[in-house]
Image (spheres, grey):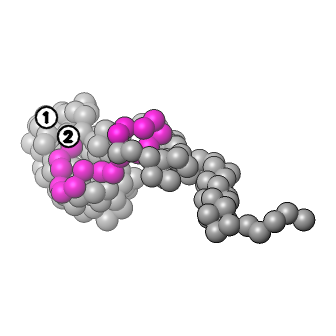
Amino acid sequence: MSGPVSSSSVRGKRLAGLSCLLAGIGLVVTARVATGRAGSHHVTLSPAPTSSAVAGSSASATPGVVAPPPSGPRTVDGDVVDTPYGPVQVAIVLDGDRIVEVKALQTPSDGGRSVRLAELATPILRQEVLRAQSAEVDTVSGATYTSDGYAQSVQYALDHR
């Protein structure tokens, strides 16, 4: 048997054990489901902070450490999506990771019927995006191209926030 164990030795072993536990957990991933153009889904994975970053490394940029989202609302423009009836583009307003507003920047304008359908569909699509907190929303009947373009523009904005 060995001699008495000091309290600093026990504390050091506990910290080492905690570091090993964190390292043993491996990668914590955040998954963000995104809808592709054909309705397929993909998942984006990003690594969590390493155990040294968790244990209190400096505040400088460390590879693998994810910075917190900026504070306060910010607006991100989606891509312009061309449809047979005209372009669709939205901007989303984010507060943290929460979508708090969706604004239609461009909607189809090729002919009176397209304009009327877009005027009817965009408020519905806006509500659906706010409810779902994603681009995965149902198509508005009669406004399929507008719905698809709207969802694609929202997804682009979410991917580039």
Q: Position of residue 69 (x, y in %)?
A: 30, 51
Callout 2 secondary element = strand
Q: Nearer the viewer, residue 52 or 95?
A: 52
Indicate the quadrant containing the C terminus: top left, top right, bottom left or bottom right: top left
Q: Which residues are magenta?
A: 60-76
Q: Could you say which quadrant of the image residue 17 lies in?
A: bottom right
Q: Could you say which quadrant of the image residue 34 lies in?
A: top left
Q: Which mark is residue 77?
A: 2
Question: Does any portion of residue 18 appear in the rendered image?
Answer: no
Residue farthest toward the front in the current orientation of the protein? 3
Q: Nearer the viewer, residue 153 or 30?
A: 30
Q: Position of residue 89 (x, y in %)?
A: 20, 39
Tell me what residue is drawn at x 22 percent, y 55 percent: 71
For label 1, the residue is 110
Tell me what residue is drawn at x 90 percent, y 65 percent: 1
The mark that comes first in sequence, 2 or 1, is 2
- For the residue marked with disc 1, what is the amino acid? Asp
Residue farthest toward the right in the current orientation of the protein? 1
Question: Does any portion of residue 161 appear in the rendered image?
Answer: yes
From this view, report whether residue 72 is shown above or below residue 3.
Answer: above
